[in-house]
Image (tube, rainbow, N blue to C red):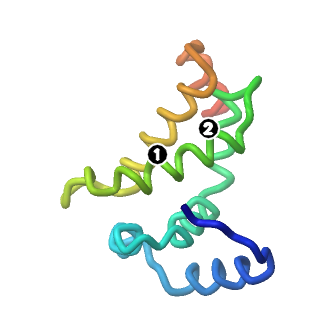
């Protein structure tokens, strides 16, 4: 398990990874056990992901949802088929984590909140 002991050092590492890893290389980096690449990928999409999570997780911890999603994506990256789009796959896993963390909520309501309808 990855343990980050020095926060300032980890932020430097994230910045370095962010500048080096492109979306097309994300799967390769995750398969190389580069968790910083995955964290950076989430950070780049944080506004959209927070909107999705807030629609599902009004009464639960969004931090737990993000942590669970990152762990599950990291563990299950080998199940991603070569032609599948990583972003769709990762968002699907994130949504699954939202559903698990927050129980069975009205999916239509969550969609409406997310889309601003």
Q: Which residue is mark 1?
A: 91
Residue occupying the point 53% across, 35% down: 97
Residue drawn 61% across the image and 38% down it: 52
Q: CA distance from mark 2 to mark 1?
A: 10 Å
Of 12 and 109, which appears nearest the observer? 12
Mark 2 in CB contact with mark 1 (< 8 angstroms): yes
Residue 87 is at least partly visible in this image:
yes
Q: Earlier in the sequence, mark 2 or mark 1?
A: 2
Q: Is residue 64 above or below residue 107?
A: below
Quadrant of image for the N terminus: bottom right
Horizontal and vertical percent for residue 50?
68, 45
Numbered tag placed on residue 7 in the rendering: none
Say above or below: 35 vs 107.
Answer: below
- The location of residue 104, given as percent across then percent down, is 55, 14
- Density class for disc 2 (Cα within 10 Å; few <14, some 14-19, many ≥20) is many
Crowd band around label 1 with a 10 angstrom C-alpha radius: few (<14), some (14–19), many (20+): some
Left or right: where 93 falls relative to 103: left
Query: From what the image shows, is residue 11 above or below residue 66?
Result: below
**In the image, 102: left or right of 89?**
right
x%, y% of residue 46?
66, 55
Question: Toward which corner of the image does residue 57 lie, by quadrant?
Answer: top right
Can residue 117 be seen at all in this image of the molecule? no
Is disc 2 placed on a helix, strand or loop? helix
Q: Nearer the viewer, residue 85 or 68?
A: 68
What secondary structure is marked by label 1? helix
Q: Position of residue 91 (x, y in %)?
A: 46, 45
Q: Residue at x 57, y 13 (%)?
A: 106
Residue at the spot x=56%, y=43% of the render?
68
Q: Which mark is residue 52?
A: 2
The answer to whether residue 39 is left or right of residue 116 is left
Q: Quadrant of residue 24?
A: bottom left
């Amino acid at each position: 398990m990855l343990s980050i002991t020095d926060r300032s050092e980890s932020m430097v590492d994230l910045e370095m990874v962010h500048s080096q890893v492109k979306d097309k290389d994300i799967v390769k980096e995750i398969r190389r056990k580069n968790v910083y690449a995955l964290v950076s990928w989430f950070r780049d999409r944080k506004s959209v992901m927070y909107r999705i999570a807030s629609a599902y997780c009004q009464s639960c911890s969004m931090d737990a949802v993000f942590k669970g999603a990152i762990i599950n994506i990291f563990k299950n990256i080998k199940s991603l088929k070569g032609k599948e789009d990583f972003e769709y796959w990762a968002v699907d896993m994130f949504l699954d984590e939202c559903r698990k963390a927050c129980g069975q909520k009205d999916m239509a309501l969550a969609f409406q909140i997310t889309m601003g309808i």
